[in-house]
Image: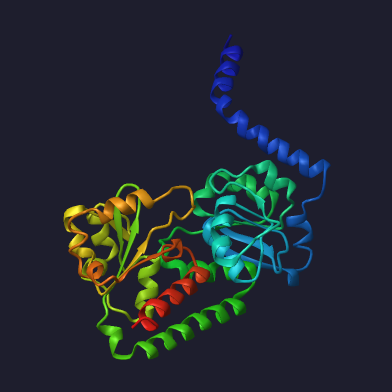
C-alpha cells in the first residue's frame, strides 16, 4: 500500500513535467539519430574557431564566424542586418517591418519571436541562436540545439548597447565601430548645417497608439538620437525614466491626455503615425486627433510643421537611426 501510494503521488506531481520531458527526450533522439551536434562539437573543434561570450544566462562558447544564425527579436534582427549578416530565420513580423527600411529580405524562414517552434529551429540546424531575456524559459531547449545567447533587458534607448552586444556575439565589432562612426559623422554634419538654430528649435516627438497619444522622452530610442543631434526638446519630453513611470507610462514614454495637448507643442513635431508591425490602421485615430479643438491651437499645427514619420522613430537600431537622421536633414535643414 505504501509503495502504491508513493508511486501515485509521484505520478501526480510529475504529470505537468511530462510534456517538457517529452520534448527534451525527443530533442536528444533527434540529435542522436539524425545528425551530430553541429553547434557544439564541430564549432568547438578548435579554440581559434570559437569565442566565449557573457550574456543574460551566463557564459557560452559560440562560433567565431557563425554562418547559420537564428534571431528571435526585432532588435537582434536589425543589428545583424546592420552588421552585414542575414539570419536564416526570424519572425515574419520583424522581417516585414525591416523590409520597409532595407528592401526585400528573401530566404529568411519564419520563427515566432515569443513562442518559437523548437522543432522548426532544430531542423534549420543553426550554429548560433540569438534571443532575449524573456526566452529564458526555453533556453535549455534552445541551447540543446545550438549555442544560444540571450540579450539582457533594456529600454529602446539602450540601442547602442544592444548593437554592441550583438556585434560582440557575432564577432563583428570592427564593422560595428564603422557603423557607429558613420552615425556620429552624419550627426556632426547635421549640427554644422543647423548652426545657431540647433539650440533654439524645439523638436517634439509623439506616437499614435490605439489607446492614446504617447510622448517619447529622453530615455527613448528617438530621445537618445535627438540628444546626440544636439537639438532642443519641449520640457514634457525631457523627463527621465522615474518621471515617466510616475506618470503611469514606461521608462521611456508616457500617454498624454487630451486636455494636455499643449505640452506636445514645439517648433516641429514628428508624429509616428505608422503601426510598427503594420497590423493596425491608425488613420482613424489620426483623424480623431486632428478633430480635437486643442489640436488646431498648437503653434506647430498652425505653422504646418507636423510631419508624419514611420516606426523607425521608435525602434530598433542603427538602420532606424540613420532613417531618423534622414528626416532631421529633410525637415530641419532642407526646409528651413
Q: Nearer the viewer, residue 17 or 252?
A: 252
Horizontal side of 37 relative to 281 (left or right) equals right
Tell me, yes or no, if residue 290 can be seen here.
yes
Query: Quadrant location of residue 40?
Result: bottom right
Count of numbered labels shown in the rendering: 0
Q: Is residue 249 above or below residue 218?
A: above
Q: How is the image coloured?
A: rainbow
Query: Quadrant location of residue 18?
Result: top right
Q: Is residue 276 above or below residue 190?
A: above
Q: Nearer the viewer, residue 158 or 62?
A: 158
Q: Quadrant of the N terminus?
A: top right
Residue visible at 61% across and 34% down in the picture: 20
Tell me, yes or no, if residue 239 can be seen here.
no
Q: Quadrant of the C terminus?
A: bottom left
Q: Nearer the viewer, residue 59 or 75?
A: 75
Q: Name the spot of residue 62 as percent of width and height, x first.
A: 67, 63
Q: Name the spot of residue 252 as percent of width and height, x first.
A: 33, 61
Q: Name the spot of residue 280 as percent of width and height, x first.
A: 44, 47
Horizontal side of 96 relative to 216 (left or right) equals right
Horizontal side of 79 relative to 30 (left or right) equals left
Horizontal side of 218 relative to 6 (left or right) equals left
Extreme residue in the top direction: 1
Q: Name the spot of residue 253 as percent of width and height, x first.
A: 31, 59
Residue visible at 24% across and 83% down in the picture: 200
Amino acid at each position: 500500500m505504501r509503495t502504491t501510494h508513493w508511486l501515485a503521488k509521484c505520478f501526480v506531481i510529475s504529470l505537468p513535467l511530462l510534456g517538457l520531458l517529452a520534448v527534451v527526450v525527443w530533442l536528444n533522439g533527434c540529435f542522436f539519430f539524425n545528425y551530430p551536434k553541429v553547434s557544439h562539437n564541430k564549432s568547438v573543434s578548435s579554440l581559434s574557431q570559437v569565442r566565449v561570450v557573457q550574456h543574460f544566462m551566463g557564459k557560452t562558447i559560440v562560433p567565431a564566424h557563425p554562418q547559420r544564425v537564428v534571431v528571435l527579436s526585432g532588435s537582434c534582427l536589425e543589428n545583424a542586418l546592420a552588421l552585414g549578416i542575414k539570419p536564416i530565420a526570424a519572425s515574419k513580423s520583424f522581417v516585414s517591418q525591416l523590409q520597409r527600411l532595407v528592401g526585400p529580405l528573401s530566404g529568411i524562414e519564419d520563427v515566432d519571436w515569443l513562442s518559437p517552434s523548437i522543432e522548426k529551429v532544430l531542423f534549420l540546424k543553426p550554429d548560433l541562436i540569438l534571443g532575449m531575456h524573456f526566452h529564458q524559459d526555453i533556453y535549455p531547449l534552445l541551447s540543446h540545439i545550438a549555442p544560444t545567447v540571450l540579450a539582457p533587458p533594456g529600454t529602446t534607448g539602450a540601442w547602442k548597447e544592444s548593437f554592441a552586444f550583438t556585434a560582440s556575439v557575432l564577432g563583428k565589432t570592427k564593422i560595428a565601430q564603422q557603423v557607429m562612426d558613420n552615425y556620429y559623422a552624419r550627426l556632426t554634419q547635421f549640427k554644422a548645417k543647423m548652426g545657431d538654430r540647433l539650440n533654439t528649435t524645439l523638436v517634439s516627438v509623439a506616437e499614435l497608439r490605439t489607446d492614446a497619444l504617447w510622448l517619447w522622452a529622453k530615455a527613448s530610442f528617438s530621445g537618445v538620437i535627438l540628444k546626440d543631434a544636439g537639438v532642443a526638446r519641449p520640457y514634457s519630453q525631457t523627463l527621465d525614466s522615474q518621471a515617466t513611470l510616475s506618470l503611469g507610462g514606461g521608462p521611456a514614454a508616457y500617454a498624454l491626455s487630451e486636455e494636455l495637448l499643449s505640452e506636445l507643442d514645439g517648433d516641429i513635431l514628428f508624429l509616428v503615425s505608422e503601426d510598427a508591425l503594420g497590423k493596425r490602421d491608425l488613420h482613424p485615430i489620426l483623424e480623431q486627433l486632428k478633430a480635437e479643438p486643442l489640436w488646431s491651437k498648437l503653434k506647430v499645427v498652425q505653422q504646418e510643421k507636423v510631419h508624419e514619420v514611420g516606426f523607425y522613430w521608435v525602434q530598433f537600431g542603427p538602420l532606424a537611426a540613420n532613417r531618423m537622421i534622414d528626416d532631421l536633414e529633410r525637415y530641419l535643414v532642407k526646409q528651413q
